[in-house]
Amino acid sequence: MLRQPRSLRLVTLCAVAVCMSLAACEIPLGSDDEPAVYEPVMGPQIPTNAAATLPLPAQAWMDRSLLLATYDETQLAEMASSPMVILPLRLSLSEEGATAIRRLRQLNPDLLVIGMFSVLSVDQSWNTANQRERFPIIGPIFDLMQPHRMTTTTGAEPLMWDGAPMVNPWTRGGFKESLLNRMMDVIAAQALLYPDILDGVFHDYMSAFPHLYPGQEDEPNVGEVDMDGDGIGTRDDPDENVAWVQWQHQLLAQWKLRFGPGLIQIVNGRLPHFDADIAGFTTGIAYESFPTTVWGYSDEEAMALLQEHLEPGWLGPARGNTFSLLWDRNGRRSTFCRIASMLLGQPYVLTDLNGFVGRDVLAPPASTPIGPMLVEDKPTGGKIFSREFVEGTARIETSSNGMTVRAEFTEAQ
Ligand SMILES: [Ca+2]
């Protein structure tokens, strides 16, 4: 199993100890110091005993549009036929979103609702009268974060992605804990108004270093991210990297503290792949563009990585389960993801569902596993991943180059 260097783990642990001792303090808005007495807003405590077993294959429904309130009864019924829906957090914690989610819950009482929210960035599209009016968390969070935008060694504004500048978490001797606390106060206070809505949060995304939005990387004179403004880029400025990771670690800790142990936290990005402390707070990893991902894995490597991450002691399960996402964002590997969901017991997302597109009609009917996934080496190279179900057998076969030659569910005779 991949483990982060012990030195970094100790730094993170020390940071958590410091954070916990500081958690009892607070400071005025706009300052990076903590005030003398800080009482965090606690969100609704999320049940720990809700449905934990996914029907397999399990399609998770990701809809990043803000159109939920416009869907008709047929569309809502299709969404509710999935065990999990992932929606923008700002929409989920709004009147229009909560009303539609309550209807989804009537249709499927076991539905898991996950709110997606961006990490260490401030999306400029939030700053409109329409967004502020429809989504109550957006105005306060935008106003909190906007003054803390990052700069680069050349004075440019680095982007997490298009239209969303990075937020600078660095402050002398640590990270901006009071800023994080105030952001979490906004979220938790709004969630208290809708205590029946959220089961979890999708953090998009987490990383060991700030990565420039790909469209910005090739711009002339963009420079390197520089949190403390000393002209030295983050990658050569170690305490900046520590602050970057500390923010993300504490973000996970704060969500869990405020919402309770039943909270599902899904993390997109590579940080929980190798950072044991981050992984311990992570209920599931989102593997974007599964199985190749942005790191160019073969199908076999992706299956091995997921197996490794699902071993006991790595991720921190909630409700007795993990919920890693096989996210076929490019829409080319739907069959592989569907069968891998059956093998690994984790949900899959087909394409980037930016708006209603309908459920996966090619999925086999819900099936009952008899045992775990088995892995067999083929004499000619490659592997066979298989899992028996009452209704048949799920199977992925790779060749010696690690790529799939067969992915199928065969019904029992
Ligand atoms: Ca620097």
Image (spheres, rainbow, N blue to C red):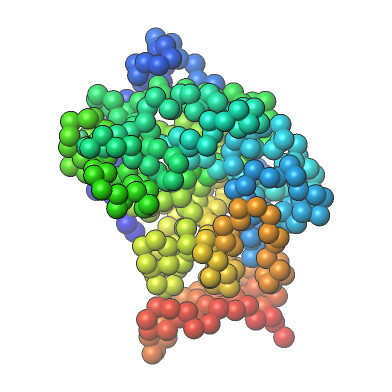
Which residue occupies the extreme top position in the image? 36
Q: Left or right of 254: which side holds 175?
A: left
Q: Residue 186 location, x and y as percent? A: 54, 24
Q: Is residue 8 visible?
A: no
Quadrant in which ligand 1 is drawn: top left
Q: Residue at x 70, y 45 (%)?
A: 68
Q: How many marks?
A: 0
Which of 225 and 258 lies nearest the eye of the viewer? Answer: 225
Q: Residue 371 location, x and y as percent? A: 58, 69
Q: Left or right of 280: which side holds 86?
A: right
Locate the C terminus and report the quarter of the image it occupies. Answer: bottom right
Q: Residue at x 48, y 35 (%)?
A: 124
Which of 253 and 296 lies nearest the eye of the viewer? Answer: 296
Please tell me whether residue 111 is drawn above or below residue 377 in the rendered image: above
Which of 68 and 133 lies nearest the eye of the viewer? Answer: 133
Locate the N terminus and report the quarter of the image it occupies. Answer: bottom left
Q: Left or right of 227: which side holds 268?
A: right
Q: Residue 104 location, x and y as percent? A: 75, 46
**In which image quadrant can residue 129 be found?**
top right
Which of 296 and 377 lies nearest the eye of the viewer? Answer: 296
**In which image quadrant can residue 27 be found?**
top left
Q: Left or right of 283: which side holds 353?
A: right
Q: Residue at x 39, y 9 (%)?
A: 36
Q: Residue 240 location, x and y as percent? A: 25, 35
**In which image quadrant can residue 260 be found?**
top right
Q: Residue at x 23, y 44 (%)?
A: 221
Q: Is residue 352 visible?
A: yes
Which residue occupies the extreme right position in the image? 73
Please tell me whether residue 101 is drawn above or below residue 42 in the rendered image: below
